[in-house]
């Protein structure tokens, strides 16, 4: 968590310990969290693991890349606070 605090995604309270989100943290786009934890490489790779995709002759699984792009768009357009609100209101879930 300290490593993440260094990226300014969360803040660290030195005196009492613990981590928290400042107002500035809450308005950051959620894509930043994904980038810091997992990286964004998977969003740019072929869904089949091929070196190159051919958009003129799409393989069945290419349809999954459209879903992936939609997910990426959600991450880019929603803040940490917006995702937290969706979770607390039951619109989305963090686990199955």
Image: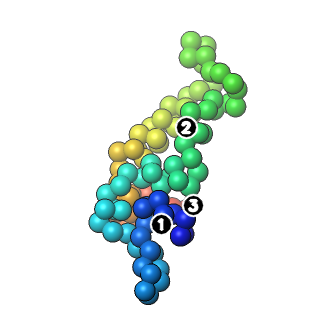
Whether the residues at callouts 2 and 3 have beta carbons within 8 Å, the answer is no
Residue at the outermost top position = 56
Which residue position holds label 3? Answer: 96
**Res. 11 image quadrant:** bottom left
The kind of secondary structure element at disc 3 is loop
Which of the two marks, 3 or 1, is nearer to us in this view? Answer: 1
Dot 2: what SS? helix
Mark carried by residue 43:
2
Cα–Cα span, label 2 and label 3? 22 Å
Q: Name the residue located 47 percent from the left edge and 66 percent from the top edge.
A: 5
User: 10 Å neighbourhood of mark 1: few (<14), some, or many (≥20)?
Assistant: some
Q: Residue furthest left?
A: 23
Q: Position of residue 90 (x, y in %)?
A: 40, 63
Q: Are marks 3 and 1 in contact (CB under 8 Å)?
A: no
Please give left or right for residue 89 compared with residue 4 in the image.
left
Looking at the rendered structure, which numbered label has been put on residue 95?
none
Residue shown at the point (58%, 51%) measured from the top left = 38
Q: Earlier in the sequence, mark 2 or mark 1?
A: 1
Q: Residue furthest bottom?
A: 16
Camera-nearest residue between 92 and 10: 10
């Amino acid at each position: 968590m300290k490593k993440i605090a260094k990226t300014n995604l969360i803040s660290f309270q030195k005196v009492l310990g613990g981590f928290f989100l400042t107002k500035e943290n809450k308005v950051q786009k959620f894509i930043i969290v994904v980038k810091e934890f997992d990286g964004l490489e998977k969003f740019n790779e072929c869904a089949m693991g091929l070196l190159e995709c051919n958009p003129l002759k799409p393989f069945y699984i290419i349809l999954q890349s459209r879903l992936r792009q939609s997910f990426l768009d959600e991450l880019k357009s929603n803040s940490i606070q917006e995702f937290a609100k969706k979770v607390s209101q039951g619109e989305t879930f963090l686990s199955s």
